[in-house]
Image: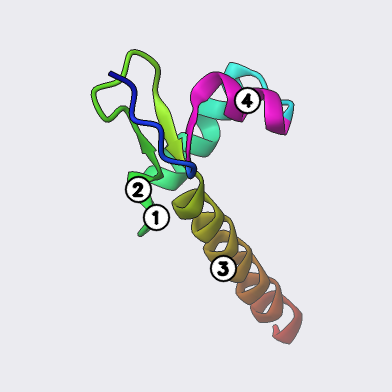
Amino acid sequence: MMINAPNLWPKRRFMEWFGIKDTTYKKWKAQCKLSPYADAFTGLGQKEPMIDMELFQRFVVWQNELEAGAQKRRVKQ
């Protein structure tokens, strides 16, 4: 039985939506695993890995805030 929550996307749909290949998917997944939003990429016992889009969006915001903070520190130096 497939869990059909609206915020859970199968890996294939996620990759098609963002126009990415498997290498980029693996890179994003690895970066996300190091964040407070590591649970965004989960299998949930499914045949195909699932992505929690709500958590992934939070990860993207978090990542952007980190990068913006790093840029501000570089400018001040």
Of pointers 3 and 2, the one earlier in the residue sequence: 2
Kindly indicate whether the residue at mark 1 contacts the one at mark 2 (C-beta within 8 angstroms).
Answer: yes
At a point 60% along the width and 70% down the height, the residue shown is 65
Kindly indicate whether the residue at mark 1 contacts the one at mark 3 (C-beta within 8 angstroms).
Answer: no
Amino acid type assigned to the residue bearing label 2 in the image: Ala
Kindly indicate whether the residue at mark 4 contacts the one at mark 1 (C-beta within 8 angstroms).
Answer: no
- Residue 15's tag is 4
| Segment colored magenta | 8-18
Closer to the camera in the image, 44 or 58: 44
Q: CA distance from mark 2 to mark 4?
A: 18 Å
Mark 1, secondary structure of its residue: loop
Q: CA distance from mark 3 to mark 2?
A: 16 Å
Q: CA distance from mark 3 to mark 4?
A: 24 Å
Q: Identify the residue position indicated by label 1 in the image.
A: 35
Amino acid type assigned to the residue bearing label 3 in the image: Leu
Q: Nearer the viewer, mark 2 or mark 4?
A: 4
Rendering quarter of residue 2: top left
Q: CA distance from mark 1 to mark 4?
A: 20 Å
Kindly indicate whether the residue at mark 4 contacts the one at mark 3 (C-beta within 8 angstroms).
Answer: no
Q: Nearer the viewer, mark 1 or mark 4?
A: 4
Q: CA distance from mark 2 to mark 1?
A: 6 Å
Image quarter where the N terminus lies is top left
Magenta-span inclusion, residue 12: yes
Q: Residue extending furthest top?
A: 47
Q: Identify the residue position indicated by label 3 in the image.
A: 66
Around disc 4, counting alpha carbons within 10 Å, would you say few (fewer than 14), some (14 to 19), or many (20 or more)?
A: some
Of pointers 2 and 4, the one earlier in the residue sequence: 4
At a point 58% along the width and 56% down the height, the residue shown is 60
Q: Nearer the viewer, mark 3 or mark 4?
A: 4
Q: Main secondary structure of the magenta part?
A: helix
Q: Identify the residue position indicated by label 2 in the image.
A: 38
Mark 3, secondary structure of its residue: helix
